[in-house]
Amino acid sequence: MKKFVLVVLVLLVGVSILQVVVVRFMDPPATMTMAWERARHWMEEKPHRPALYIWRDLDEISPHLRRAVMAAEDQRFLFHHGFDFTEIRQAARDVISKRKIRGASTITMQAARSVFLLPSRSVGRKMVEAYYTVLMECCWDKHRILEIYLNTVDWGVGIVGAEAAANRYFSCSAAALTPDQAALMTAILPSPHKWSVKRPTPYLKARQRRILRHMKAMPLL
């Protein structure tokens, strides 16, 4: 039994490493959520409308959006190795003080979640997410991580990635996004199925203004 478990573990590690190496060179045809939704509808014999998903290389995405996502989601992206321990400590202090519960996921962690993991919330999923984060930081450079993130992040119902979001929200390409548009698109990312770019609340507009201020300090990748 121990040998069997060991063999299974070795196979799983080998497959995961192969996945990460392949995606370093090949753009993923879909996210795991997209694949899961397609499979679920097929098993339930229900019609399925695939999410809008259009791949764009990083240099085809507005520099304003690249700066905006770093400003809002992971300001130390270029300087950590997948885990922002400063942000993790602050999130832990917030929980202890009972002020609020918030995430401390980096851009790498979010990209790992989108590309390699099924949508779920569990301790086990977070552990596997951390494992893939380490692999990605070892195998990919920051340019590739940001490119994968921007193309696979959930940007609303049936909208995956920057190009699809720019098309749907502003009827333009991701390359043509203005600073205001990029900041507003980024402002909804914590809850893209709850908040709306087309109907921004006062809170979202305040987030947009804060992101615009921080964007000025972000390097261009």
Image (spheres, grey):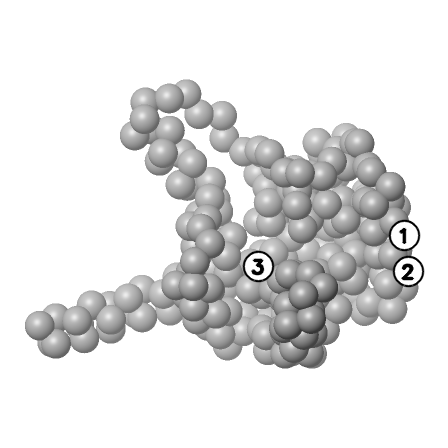
Residue 151 vs 110, above or below: the answer is: above
**Residue drawn 75% across and 49% down?**
186
In the picture of the structure, the residue carrying the numbered disc 3 is 110
**Residue drawn 54% across and 70% down?**
140
In the picture of the structure, the residue carrying the numbered disc 2 is 213
Query: In the rendering, at what x and y percent does residue 182 appear?
Result: 80, 47
Label 3: which secondary element = helix
**Residue drawn 37% across and 29% down?**
41
Residue 80 vs 177, above or below: the answer is: below
Out of 19 and 182, give the one closest to the viewer. Answer: 182
Mark 2 and mark 1: span between their CA atoms?
Answer: 6 Å
Labelled disc at residue 220: none
Quick one: label 2, few (<14), some, or many (20+) residues within 10 Å? some
Type of the residue with mark 1: Arg
In the picture of the structure, the residue carrying the numbered disc 1 is 209
Quick one: label 3, few (<14), some, or many (20+) residues within 10 Å? many
Query: In the rendering, at what x and y percent does residue 40 appear?
Result: 36, 34
Residue 3 position by quadrant: bottom left
Type of the residue with mark 3: Gln
Mark 3 and mark 2: span between their CA atoms?
Answer: 23 Å
The answer to which of marks 1 and 3 sits earlier in the sequence is: 3
Query: Is residue 79 visible to the viewer in this orientation of the structure?
Result: yes
Type of the residue with mark 2: Arg
Q: Quadrant of the N terminus?
A: bottom left
Query: In the rendering, at what x and y percent does residue 39 appear?
Result: 35, 35
Q: Are marks 1 and 3 in contact (CB under 8 Å)?
A: no
